[in-house]
Image (cartoon, helix red, strand yellow):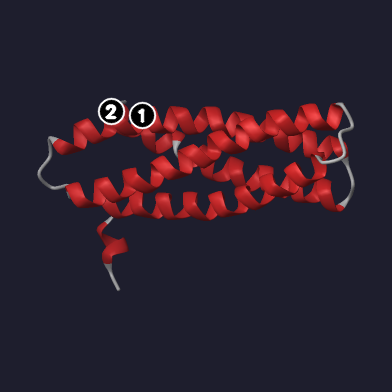
């Protein structure tokens, strides 16, 4: 197994984790269930760690792919650009989740606003991750180039 295999395995987790965490958080908000919200915070923190792992493995994958003339540098660069943005938003979601956990434990009244903000970020970040995944697929899967 090389860095590319590892990257392909790891990159699916932040995509799925972001969607699962958003679902938990929205359910926790709608049902007024603190346990669901706290579970979502934990998943967001895990997602941030997994996003870091995906980013690190992506750097190594890029090095390997650049040695092969069959791969487009432009496609790799586009994938890398959006992946970097998704990574940043995952880290923001993870950090805000730590803050939201603390605010909820202290019963601070604006914890709900932070939680809603995290949910909005998560839904947008899921869309961004889906786009990043598509762009990653385009690098290798020629069938995605068909119109």
For this orientation, the residue located farthest to the bottom is 147
Where residue 140 appears, x then y in whole percent? 26, 50
Residue at 43% x, 55% y: name it.
Answer: 131
Q: In which quadrant of the rendered image does the C terminus lie?
A: bottom left
Name above or below for residue 137 compared with residue 101. below
Q: Is residue 140 visible?
A: no
Left or right: 4 as drawn, with respect to 15: left
Q: Secondary structure at mark 1?
A: helix
Crowdedness near tag 1: few (<14), some (14–19) or many (≥20) residues, C-alpha within 10 Å: many
Q: Secondary structure at mark 2?
A: helix
Q: Pick the residue in front: 132 or 108.
A: 108
Where residue 130 appears, x then y in whole percent? 48, 53
Where residue 112 appears, x then y in whole percent? 81, 44
Q: Is residue 144 visible?
A: yes
Crowdedness near tag 2: few (<14), some (14–19) or many (≥20) residues, C-alpha within 10 Å: some
Q: Are dots 1 and 2 in contact, CB under 8 Å?
A: yes
Residue at 86% x, 34% y: name it.
Answer: 108
Name above or below for residue 147 compared with residue 143. below
Residue under pointer 2: 60
């Amino acid at each position: 197994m090389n860095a590319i295999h590892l990257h392909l395995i790891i990159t699916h987790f932040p995509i799925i984790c972001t969607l699962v965490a958003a679902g938990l958080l929205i359910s926790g908000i709608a049902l007024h269930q603190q346990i669901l919200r706290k579970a979502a915070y934990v998943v967001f923190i895990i997602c941030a760690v997994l996003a870091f792992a995906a980013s690190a493995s992506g750097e190594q994958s890029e090095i390997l792919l650049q040695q092969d003339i069959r791969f487009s540098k432009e496609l790799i660069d586009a994938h890398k650009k959006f992946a970097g943005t998704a990574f940043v938003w995952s880290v923001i979601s993870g950090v805000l989740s730590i803050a939201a956990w603390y605010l909820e434990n202290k019963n601070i009244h604006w914890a709900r606003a932070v939680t809603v903000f995290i949910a909005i970020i998560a839904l947008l970040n899921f869309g961004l991750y889906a786009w990043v995944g598509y762009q990653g697929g385009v690098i290798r899967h020629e069938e995605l180039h068909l119109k």
